[in-house]
Amino acid sequence: MAENNQNAGAGNVPPKPKPAAPGAAKPAAPGAPKPAAPVAAKQAAPAAAKPAAAQGGVYKPPVERPDPNPFKDAKVSPVAAWFQERFYVLEPVIAYLKKKEVPKHRLSFWYYFGGLTLFFFMIQVLTGLLLLQYYKPTGSEAFSSFVFIQKEVPFGWLIRQIHAWSANLMVGMAFIHMFSTFFMKSYRKPRELMWVSGFVLLVLSLGFGFTGYLLPWNELAFFATQVGTEVPKVMPGGAILVDILRGGEEVSPETLTRMFSLHVVLLPGLLLLVLTAHLMLVQVLGTSAPIGYKESGMIKGYEKFFPTFLAKDAIGWLLGFGLLVYLSAVFPWEIGVQADPLGSAPVGIKPEWYFWAQFQLLKDFTFEGGELVAIILFTIGAVVWGAVPFLDRKASKEEKSPMFTILGLLVLAFLVINTYRVYAEYSAL
Ligand code: HEM
């Protein structure tokens, strides 16, 4: 590429004037009028300036490359060579990616969870597209189209079950990935934006779960969405947000349309955008090792990302896929009963498991104004968590930061204990 640029530049620079031969006419004094160009040369100029091929109607770059295909001798298949010739500007990027190495140490196992989250996301996109072929997002047809997918469409049950299980596994993997990168302090300088973009990805993934829950239009989903969309009402101006989410005062078929458009258009678009940034940062900045590992000789070596680490990633993906099919076949999600907006709520309405910790917090704060306090506390907590790389100054100086390790343990304990409390309470119903 650089070679081409050099040539391109050389093509625009006029050749250096040769030293004048002895006895030749002296150059004109500065300021003197320039002598007129010889008439013959002037007439010949327009024809010479036109590239020969342009006259034949075919575009030809004004500057010839010395070798139009510098990769013609590369040892790749003709198809790969064809693409290489066209995408030659990406050569340095590919060469850079090939150089990426992953450190090997006793915590290397945790590096697989980002890739697993990505794998389950790809499964979501694929199965979601297949479901879209039969799903109808209207109050009158949503439930029956779900039953049709489950019972009539060949392998429809499997696709639907995989979509539902993969959603849960994706969120689960994202949580494991987040905590593992937290405890390894992978967010420290210069990886701050990896953490921030990752945090946004988690929020978007939770948004997928929330909006997808209503789509089967069954009783459980209907009333859980009613409870979930009610929450912002306690905040000042929250009623407007509730109205926007629901498309009216109550959960109705309007809400289904909104959730559907968020689920299949807005959230995937945003997630793809942020995911691209996240993965680009991973490639550019490389994989980090925990603080002090390098200095104390705890790194056992490095392995090439391509193909060694990627091949191991693929083994993890195969295992993940096996688990998905197993769970889908052995523990299928129920279809439930069609939602009846006029019916009364059944007992045991609760959100998806990844909202249980917040749900429990709201239930615990039963005093006057408690819900608002819970929301404020939770929002502050989320902002602090998202800003961790900028607060943990010690880690950014490659110093151990036990206070932040304790913070991580407290957050983890809060999530696990509260989630378990909801599980214990509702499984006893
Ligand atoms: C859809 C969700 C996500 C996907 C698909 C994803 C994907 C990945 C992948 C493939 C890697 C490289 C391999 C690895 O180190 O595991 C990575 C690294 C990283 N991710 Fe994520 N991620 C997601 C969510 C998150 C979340 C929620 C956080 C934290 C809030 C996060 C923070 C990081 C950090 C800090 C790294 C760098 C690790 C290092 O340099 O050692 N990611 N992510």
Image (cartoon, rainbow, N blue to C red):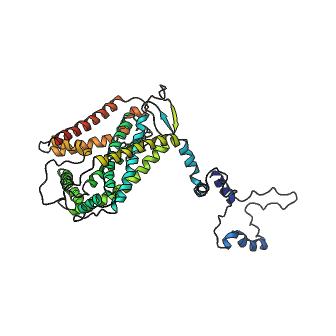
In the figure, 304 relative to 349: above or below?
above
Residue shown at 25% from the left, 59% from the top: 147
Foreground residue, 30 or 407?
A: 407
Based on the displayed image, in which of its 4 quarters is residue 78 positioned?
Answer: bottom right
Residue at 28% x, 57% y: name it.
150
Q: Residue at x 15, y 60 (%)?
A: 341
* Residue in the foreground of this view, choosing between 136 and 334: 334
Q: Nearer the viewer, residue 17 or 88?
A: 88
Residue at the extreme right: 23
Left or right of residue 350: residue 275: right
Instruction: Classify the position of the C terminus by image quarter.
Output: top left
Q: Quadrant of residue 128?
A: bottom left
Q: Position of residue 146 (x, y in %)?
A: 27, 59
Position of 206 relative to 104 (above/below): below
Decide if residue 264 is in sight here: yes
Q: Position of residue 259 (x, y in %)?
A: 27, 58
* Most foreground residue, 284 or 256: 256
What percent of the width, then of the height, locates residue 416? 26, 37
Residue 386 in view in this figure: no
Marks counted in the figure total: 0
Q: Residue at x 67, y 55 (%)?
A: 7
Where's residue 292, x and y in %?
45, 28
Name the side, left or right, on which 36 lies relative to 271: right
Quadrant location of ligand 1?
top left
